[in-house]
C-alpha cells in the first residue's frame, strides 16, 4: 500500500486522550468509546485512510484493534525512530500536538507498511505471553528477596512465590488450550519444536511476536529480531559489529533456545564450538546460533518439504 499524503491520519496516543492530526489540522478526543466513535466518523470522510500511531506500551492496542475492526489500515511505528526524526529536524520541544504533527511529517516522508491485523489466536496469545513475562519477573524478584529475608517474614514470601508459580501454571494451561483450539497454529508449533532446543514457549513466542516470519526475506527477518550485526567503520577503522534494535521479546527467547541448543543440538553445538575455536567470544557465537535457529524456523514454516538434516 502506498497511501497518498492526504490519506494519512497521525494519532498521538496517551492513556486518556488521542491527539488526531489530519492534513487540515489537529484536534483532541477522549480515549474511550465516545472518542473512538467520533474518530470513526472522521476516518469515514477519507477514501483510503492510513492511521499512523506509535507503539506506546500497549496503550495503542485498543486503537489498533478498533481500526482493524473498521477495515481501516493502521501502521504502528517505533517511537524511537520518530523521536530521532524530530531531533534531526532540530525540534527539542515535546507535547501531544507537537508529537502528532511530527508523526504526520514522519509518515509523509517514509514509506510505511500497514501493520497486519492479528488473528484471534494471536491477540489472546500476546496477552498470555505478556502476562507470563510479568509473572516470571515477579517470581525472580521474590526468590531474590527470599535469600536474604529474616526468618519471621520468610513464610510470607514463600506464600507469594507459591501463588505466582500457580499463576504461571494457569497461564501455561490457557496457552496450551489456545494452541489446541487452533489447528494451524498447533501444526506450526510442532514444526518449530522439531529443532532441538526450541520448546513450546519459544515456538509460541516466535509465532506470536514475529508473524512476518513467512513473508519477509532472510535479512529482513534477522533485522526484525534484532540479530543483524551492523557495521561500525570509518575510514581505515574497522569497528566492532553490534546487534541492536529489533524485538526484544524474540531475542530473549531465542537466546535461551540457543543456549540449550549449544548443549543438546549436535549441529548448533558444533557450530558454536567452531566459532569459539576461531577466537569468537562465546556470547557472539550464541548470537550467531540464534540467527541460525531463526532462519531454520523460517525454512520450516515457509517450505512444507523442508526437513532437518
Image (spheres, rainbow, N blue to C red):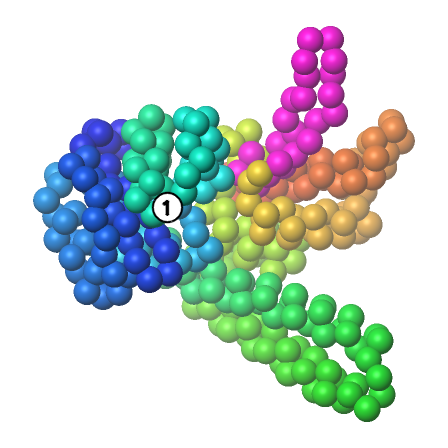
For the point 19% across and 54% down, the residue is: 39
Q: Is residue 283 visible?
A: yes
Q: Position of residue 74 (x, y in %)?
A: 30, 45
Quadrant housing residue 17: bottom left
Q: Nearer the viewer, residue 181 or 241?
A: 241
Q: Position of residue 42 (x, y in %)?
A: 14, 49
Is residue 307 toward the left or the right of residue 5 in the image?
A: right
Quadrant where the C terminus sits is top right
Q: Judge whether 88 appears above or below 59 on screen.
A: above
Q: Nearer the viewer, residue 223 or 101?
A: 101
Q: Judge whether 237 appears above or below 228 on screen.
A: above
Q: Position of residue 55 (x, y in %)?
A: 43, 49
Q: Judge whether 230 appears above or below 244 on screen.
A: above
Q: Nearer the viewer, residue 52 or 249?
A: 52
Is residue 106 toward the left or the right of residue 20 in the image?
A: right
Would you say residue 230 sits in the magenta stretch?
Answer: yes
For the point 37% across and 60% down, the residue is: 15
The magenta-colored residue range is 223-244
Q: Position of residue 68 (x, y in %)?
A: 27, 52
For the point 41% across and 26% down, the residue is: 89
For the point 27% across and 32% down, the residue is: 1
Identify residue for label 1: 95
Amino acid at each position: 500500500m502506498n497511501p497518498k499524503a492526504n490519506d494519512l491520519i497521525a494519532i498521538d496516543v496517551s492513556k486518556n486522550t488521542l491527539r488526531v492530526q489530519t492534513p487540515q489540522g489537529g484536534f483532541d478526543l477522549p480515549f474511550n468509546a465516545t472518542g473512538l466513535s467520533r474518530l470513526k466518523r472522521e476516518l469515514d470522510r477519507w477514501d483510503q485512510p492510513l492511521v499512523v500511531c506509535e507503539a506506546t506500551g500497549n496503550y495503542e492496542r485498543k486503537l489498533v484493534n478498533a481500526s482493524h475492526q473498521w477495515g481501516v489500515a493502521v501502521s504502528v511505528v517505533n517511537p524511537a525512530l520518530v523521536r530521532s526524526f524530530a531531533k534531526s529536524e532540530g525540534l527539542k520541544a515535546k507535547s501531544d500536538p507537537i508529537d502528532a504533527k511530527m508523526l504526520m511529517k514522519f509518515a509523509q516522508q517514509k514509506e510505511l507498511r500497514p501493520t497486519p491485523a492479528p488473528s484471534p489466536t494471536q491477540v489472546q496469545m500476546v496477552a498470555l505471553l505478556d502476562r507470563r513475562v510479568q509473572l516470571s519477573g515477579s517470581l525472580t524478584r521474590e526468590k531474590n528477596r527470599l535469600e536474604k529475608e529474616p526468618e519471621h517474614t520468610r513464610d510470607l514470601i514463600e506464600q507469594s512465590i507459591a501463588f505466582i508459580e500457580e499463576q504461571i501454571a494457569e497461564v501455561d494451561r490457557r496457552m496450551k488450550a489456545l494452541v489446541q483450539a487452533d489447528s494451524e497454529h498447533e501444526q506450526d508449533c510442532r514444526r518449530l519444536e522439531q529443532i532441538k532446543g526450541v520448546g513450546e514457549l519459544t515456538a509460541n513466542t516466535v509465532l506470536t511476536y514475529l508473524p512476518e516470519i513467512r513473508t519477509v526475506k532472510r535479512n529482513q527477518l534477522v533485522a526484525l529480531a534484532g540479530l543483524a550485526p551492523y557495521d561500525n567503520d570509518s575510514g581505515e577503522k574497522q569497528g566492532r559489529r553490534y546487534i541492536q534494535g529489533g524485538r526484544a521479546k524474540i531475542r530473549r527467547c531465542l537466546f535461551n533456545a540457543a543456549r540449550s541448543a549449544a548443549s543438546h543440538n549436535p549441529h548448533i553445538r558444533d557450530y558454536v564450538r567452531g566459532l569459539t575455536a576461531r577466537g569468537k567470544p562465546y556470547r557472539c557465537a550464541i548470537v550467531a546460533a540464534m540467527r541460525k535457529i531463526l532462519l531454520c524456523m523460517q525454512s520450516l514454516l515457509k517450505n512444507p518439504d523442508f526437513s532437518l538434516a
